[in-house]
Image (cartoon, rainbow, N blue to C red):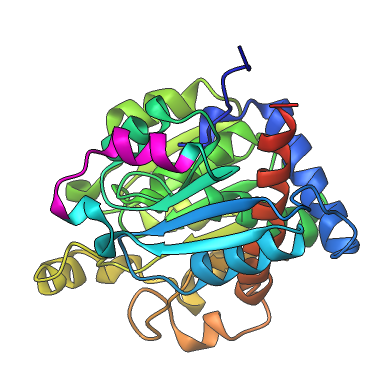
Amino acid sequence: MPPAPRHFLRDDDLSPAEQAEVLSLARAMKADRFGYRPLAGPRTVAVLFDKPSLRTRVSFAVGIAELGGLPLVIDAQATHASRGETVADTARVLARQVAAVVWRTFGQDQLTELAAASSVPVINGLTDRFHPCQILADLQTVREAHGRLAGLTLAFLGDGSSNMAHSYLLGGATAGLHVRICSPEAYRPDPDVLAAAAGAGGSVTATADPKAACADADILATDVWTSMGQEGQEAGRTSAMAPYQLNEDKLALAAPGCRVLHCLPAHRGQEITAAVLDGPASVVWDQAENRLHAQKALLAWLLGQRQ
């Protein structure tokens, strides 16, 4: 019987040592972009989308091709899932024909169900609860900017209950970062995620005080205030989160050499000012590119666990 596949459903599915291996491989793949071909054959990777996408769609499709594979990009709403086929049945069909499955969807429970029935690795391309592939790219970007990860302080401003905040907690703590999630009280992180992150390494803090969060931070990060599936909540969210805008005043509180992250798409003048997003502290374009390299490394690493 073949060994059970390794999945990447949330950030702490990788131990600190495993996360470091993936990030080291990502750095090597970036330096030698076409030198790694673990999917030569070509082996196919299915990439399913329930949500719109630019960076996830492009980075996985390009990355799979550069690894020598065939990206099979599927609009999940155009499949029989829209007519009631179960998630488990979908997993069983795909696993007999592809090397791995990536799914960008809504519920984390659906992704967990897919992985439970799959005999090939399943990767979280984004859910409402976590965005772990983005955080791998962010960690790669921070290491490029600062030369290290452990011991740095990252402050996230905005919706502390969002998938990005949850993944910064888990993935950042795994990397040894000191993670501060700064949000209105009504948008605090899930207590279970905070507890899990507290045991992962580094340190984690949830606060409603932007000045305290930004003070001497090495990295400032933010994301949109209203995500997909939250349409109709814009007014209330904007009112609550306006004090948490990432702007020049908050950047001035951070440590010298602070770098700014935003996973994009960005709304200049809302969660972040144009002066900060487009300014010298911003590494958002490196961050967007590093989705490609980090995900290539993750795919190669997960498939390597099955050999």
Q: Judge whether 6 appears above or below 290 on screen.
A: above
Judged left or right of residue 29, residue 184 is: left
Estimate the x, y position of residue 186 in percent, counting from the top left.
17, 48
Most common SS among magenta residues: helix
Residue 112 falls in image quadrant = top left
Judged left or right of residue 163, residue 99 is: right
Q: How many marks?
A: 0
Q: Quadrant of the N terminus?
A: top right
Q: Residue at x 9, y 71 (%)?
A: 232
Q: Is-magenta flag for residue 85? A: yes
Q: Quadrant of the C terminus?
A: top right
Estimate the x, y position of residue 244 in percent, counting from the top left.
34, 65
Q: Nearer the viewer, residue 155 or 174?
A: 174
Q: Judge whether 152 appears above or below 197 on screen.
A: below
Q: Judge whether 84 appears above or below 277 on screen.
A: above
Estimate the x, y position of residue 225 in percent, counting from the top left.
28, 67
Numbered range of the magenta stretch: 83-94
